[in-house]
Image (cartoon, grey):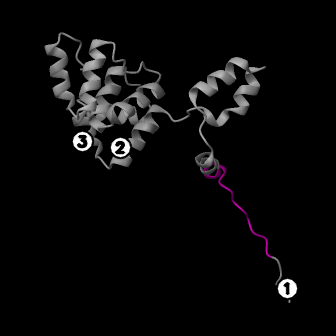
Amino acid sequence: MFLPLKKYKIIINYDVMLVKAVAFMKEKRTDDLKQELMSAPSLEKYLSENRDSFKVESTAAMLSRLIDERKIAKSTVARESGMSEIYLYQILSGRRSPSRNRLICLCFGLSVGVDGAQELLRLSGAAQLYPRIRRDAIIIYGLSHGMSLFDVNDRLFEQNEETLF
């Protein structure tokens, strides 16, 4: 005996499916992407074939994700980053774009370490920390040794380097 067929509305969340599919794909290395780009017959073909390799997370989205992952109160992040809560909320809403110095301050406030700082700076389009630059070396040292933003600022001042704020 067959039951009568009912009409069902099928809702597919393609964004979730895309995220899950991307999670199972092996991420291409930057050098491989560069090589493909250099030898691509057309830009359009390269862009369409590597659509999933491009970073699409905004600075605000990444910062919000880091705050959520670490389960830190936004007021604590603002305080540890040496900025007002209002300014932090403006950054998180996308109304303000933080400078490189402010991004670095947020890295200390979020305790992301050197790799996290490099990722945030890269994603934001800011110059990454470079150990051959004296000021950046002091900042890298502070991030890698768990120093507070305020201690690093003191070190920068002692070494006659521009402070972060």
Residue 30, x across and y down, in percent: 57, 27
Q: Is residue 63 above or below residue 18?
A: above
Residue 96, x across and y down, in percent: 40, 27
Q: Name the residue located 29 percent from the left edge and 28 percent from the top edge.
A: 105
Residue 113 picture quarter: top left
* Residue 26 vs residue 149, the one in the foreground: 26
* Label 1 CA crowd tier, 10 Å (few <14, some 14–19, many 20+): few
Identify the residue under disc 3.
Answer: 76
Residue 116 picture quarter: top left
Secondary structure found at label 3: helix
Q: Magenta residues, as a range?
A: 6-17
Asked if marks 2 and 1 touch (Cβ < 8 Å), the reply is: no
Q: Main secondary structure of the magenta part?
A: loop
* Image quadrant where one finds the C terminus: top left
Give residue 67's mark.
2
* Residue 45 vs residue 58, the one in the foreground: 45
Identify the residue under disc 1.
Answer: 2
Q: Is residue 10 magenta?
A: yes
